[in-house]
Amino acid sequence: MILLSRAEEIILMSVYKLHGDAYGVTIREQVKKDIGRYWSFGVIYKTLKKMKAKGFVKRIASDPLSERGGRTRYYYEITPAGISALEKILKIHSTIWSGFEGFRLEKKTK
């Protein structure tokens, strides 16, 4: 079984949440919303490239956009394999965290 890296998991979940409006900027904003900080576009695009190669996402080119000087925007969509990968990682997280209901880390005092 191939597990998702944490970056793959976060970005794949962002693509899923964006329902067809997932491209670099919107993915970056969703990551910020979910984890509280921005990731560089380099990290996002490198991870998307790896997930595309694994078949977890597909890349779709838009028509050229006038506001982008006629350049194409690339959107990403989750594939059935990507959904399956998220389902597997959710099951693993549930198993790992079972028994920790109400768990809180206590700061150690000196």
Image (tube, helix red, strand yellow):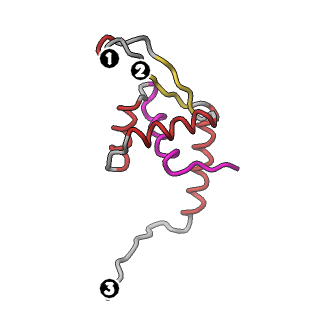
> Which residue is drawn at the image coordinates 67% and 48% (left, top)?
2
Given residues 14 and 59, the one toward you in this image is 59
- Which of the two labelled residues, at mark 2 and mark 1, occupies the earlier sequence position? 1
Which residue corresponds to mark 2? 73
Decide: is 98 above or below 86.
below
- Which of the two labelled residues, at mark 2 and mark 3, occupies the earlier sequence position? 2
Is the C-beta separation of discs 2 and 1 under 8 Å?
yes
Residue 33 location, x and y as percent? 33, 43
Q: Secondary structure at mark 3?
A: loop
What separation in Å lies between label 1 and label 3 (alpha carbons)? 55 Å
Q: Secondary structure at mark 1?
A: helix
Is the C-beta separation of discs 2 and 3 under 8 Å?
no
Which residue corresponds to mark 1? 68
On screen, residue 2 versus residue 15, left or right, reads right
Q: Which residues are magenta?
A: 1-20
Q: Label 1 amino acid?
A: Arg
Task: Find residue 93 and report its image quarter.
Answer: bottom right
Decide: is 29 above or below 61.
below
> Which residue is drawn at the image coordinates 40% and 32% (left, top)?
24
Is the C-beta separation of discs 1 and 3 under 8 Å?
no
Residue 50 location, x and y as percent? 57, 39
On screen, residue 1 versus residue 9, left or right, reads right
Q: Nearer the viewer, mark 2 or mark 3?
A: 2
Which residue corresponds to mark 3? 109
